[in-house]
Amino acid sequence: MSRHAIHAADYPPSWYAATRHPDLGLPTLEGEEQADVCIVGGGFTGLNTAIELAKRGLSVVLLEARQIGWGASGRNGGQLIRGVGHDLDQFAGVIGAQGVRDLKLLGIEAVEIVRERIAEFDIDCDLAWGYCDLANKPRHLDAFRADRDELLALGYRHALTLVEPDQMRSVVGSDRYVGGLIDMGSGHLHPLNLALGEAAAARALGVRLYENSAATAIDQGTTITVHTARGRVRAGQLMLGCNAYHSGLERRLGSQVIAAGSYLIATEPLPAELAAELIPQNMALCDQRVALDYYRLSADRRLLFGGACHYSGRDPADVAAYMRPKMLAVFPQLADVRIDYQWGGMIGIGANRLPQIGRLPDQPNVFYAQAYSGHGLNATHLAARILGEAMTGQASRGFDLFSQVPHMAFPGGKRFRSPLLALGMLWQKLKQGEF
């Protein structure tokens, strides 16, 4: 793949920023625009909602506070994994058994939406298929068997393979795990280049995209006015897709999502033999701990290693120094390998780990989607499809399902919300025996 480092300083330093596609040359909003819909947020949620609406014939203006994909959409681990939410059976009392089954099917559909979008617009983003859940304990492998059986009962069409302990070296060059579940319907990609490709697709469909155009105020009503430093947008409908980067414009939504830090490092390019030893089948991999590790190979054979989800609100002073020991605990054979890139970012997490998709109860023309809890690459695309249907008056089983589930506000207010959640996660680690 041809790589470019054009205006890379506009983005937080990362391997993704250093290897991204050329700048799109998007302007800053100046003056007044009018549209059917204004979207706030230039990540996967906003971009794909714009595509869905434009394909349905609506005029759309999208405002991004910084650059397209600047937040989690352009900094995440690049793992495209089936499923949406955590422990969906917990919602049976609200949406019923059939509703839970429909959510599970939507979690499968979410990956297919990404697959179709990449194919439709011929987006060059290093897409590779193959993912493996890694068992840290025997009970995890038992859970994988149940997962496999449930997916097959749902009609999952991609290959699922249980990996027994004596077969683990065929998947990962580490002695840390006791089994795995391979899913060939999930995979990995370059997330920033996917976002940039989707931005180009949205622009080709007539969406007006503006960077460096943070929303500073919103006047709600039958016609909504979104103000920026140099202009404003008047629209019949508004969609808020800010996730972990809420600016406080809509405090109700901000209180239901907490920003948690996740961090990655990228090694120097590895010799082909070493890369094949680490991840023989070029899969994305993730373990089952509360403080999970996730990793994969890049297109230029670097190991991208991430994890260490932080709820404290404080980033490590040196991400590489913090993450390197975690990497070496999995792959001690990398002791002499150089770390070329280190970065982090914020993911949006809700209390029940189910994405929050709906509309404001007192403002029926204001829609939102957020709180993907670390599974945003596929869940954002599903949310956009659901929003596209709902905002154009189409029947949407997904919108009805998601909007029925209540979401609590995190206690403690803005100042104490993160420390309280950090204590809760510490307790979860202690229960799981991760110390």
Image (cartoon, grey):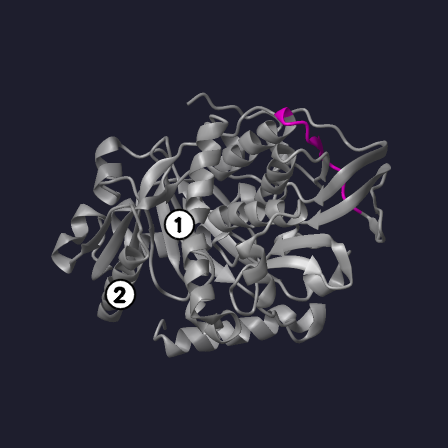
**Quarter of the figure with the N terminus:** top left
From the viewer's perspective, tell me whether residue 146 is left or right of residue 384: left
- From the viewer's perspective, is the residue at label 1 or at label 2 nearer? 2
* Of pointers 1 and 2, the one earlier in the residue sequence: 1
Mark 1 in CB contact with mark 2 (< 8 angstroms): no
Where disc 1 sits, the SS reads loop
Identify which amino acid the numbered label 2 is placed on.
Ala
**Residue 179 in the image: x percent, y percent?**
21, 59
Question: Magenta span covers which residues?
Answer: 204-215
Q: Is residue 136 left or right of residue 73?
A: left
Residue carrying label 2: 146
**Could you say where residue 176 lies in the image, as x and y percent from the top left?**
24, 59
Choose between 215 and 238: the one closer to the eye.
238
Residue drawn at the location 65% of the way across and 40% of the way down: 42
For the residue pair 197 and 364, the one nearer the viewer reads as: 364
Q: Does the magenta stretch include residue 385?
A: no
Asked whether 235 or 30 is in front, the reply is: 235
378 lies left or right of 24: left
Residue 81 shows which numbered tag? 1
Q: Quadrant of the C terminus?
A: bottom left
